[in-house]
Image (cartoon, rainbow, N blue to C red):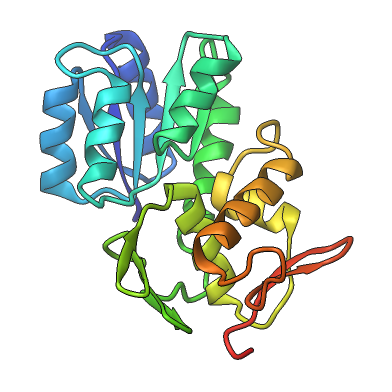
Amino acid sequence: MSRIIVIEDDVAILRGLKDSLEYESYEVYTATDGEQGYRLIQEHCPDLIVLDLMIPRMDGYELCRKVRSEGIATPILMLTARSEEMDRVHGLDIGADDYVTKPFSVPELLARIRAILRRAQSPTALPENLRFDDVIVDFTCFDVKKAEQVLKLSRKEFGVLRLLAARAGQVVTRNELLDEVWGHESYPTTRTVDNHIASLRAKLEDDPSEPRHLITVHGVGYKLVIEA
């Protein structure tokens, strides 16, 4: 049984979500503010966090940043009444996996939750570390070094690299990267995947203009070649 924490200060919405999720046989814990939600996350190690942005005592943005900074990789589905694109983009950039804008359809929300949990429980074995040339990546601690120099990668860059490492030597399409790493159909575009690959090459390849490990398969996607 998947464990879900819902953090929402609107009591009516919170009650409705709890009832709907429990009807679907999820184990549900609820909180009405960010501090209470943070404590529940620490206590119950959820499989998914449903997080409203506009909550008291640590808003959704701050709580999301906090759990990601502590290395907690639990998927986060954000709920927001804001419709502006930049608000949604900001939530995704700081670590959310998906979002739903209020007012939302409960069946759609449940479908998104099922999709997130399927991705999180994918049978593809995600590696805990990766080594090639003078690069050492620890995916569990979000650490990366090249020639003993500590590098900074965004969470999405780690996600792209980890999926490529899980399928090393195999082609991963741009759409697969979008589905698995971003988990969102309307944002971003495949160009965003290309930009993240370019950024990874700049950080990890000896010569980014002639990559030996992060290889483009034209018209399809990318693959990671460890031996080159």
Front-most of residues 14 and 195: 195
Above or below: residue 170 compared with residue 173: below
Residue positioned 42% across, 52% down in the render? 153
Whole-percent x, y for residue 133 in the image: 48, 84
Q: Quadrant of the C terminus?
A: bottom right
Residue positioned 57% across, 44% down in the render? 182
Whole-percent x, y for residue 20 in the image: 42, 29
- In the image, taking residue 52 as reference, residue 46 lies left or right, namely left
Front-most of residues 54 and 66: 66
Q: Quadrant of the N terminus?
A: bottom left
Whole-percent x, y for residue 70 in the image: 20, 47
Whole-percent x, y for residue 197 in the image: 63, 56
Q: Is residue 103 visible?
A: yes
When asked about the image quadrant of residue 138, the answer is bottom left
Farthest-out residue, right: 219
Farthest-out residue, bottom: 227
Front-most of residues 99 and 153: 153
- In the image, taking residue 228 as reference, residue 1 lies left or right, namely left
Residue positioned 10% across, 36% down in the render? 39
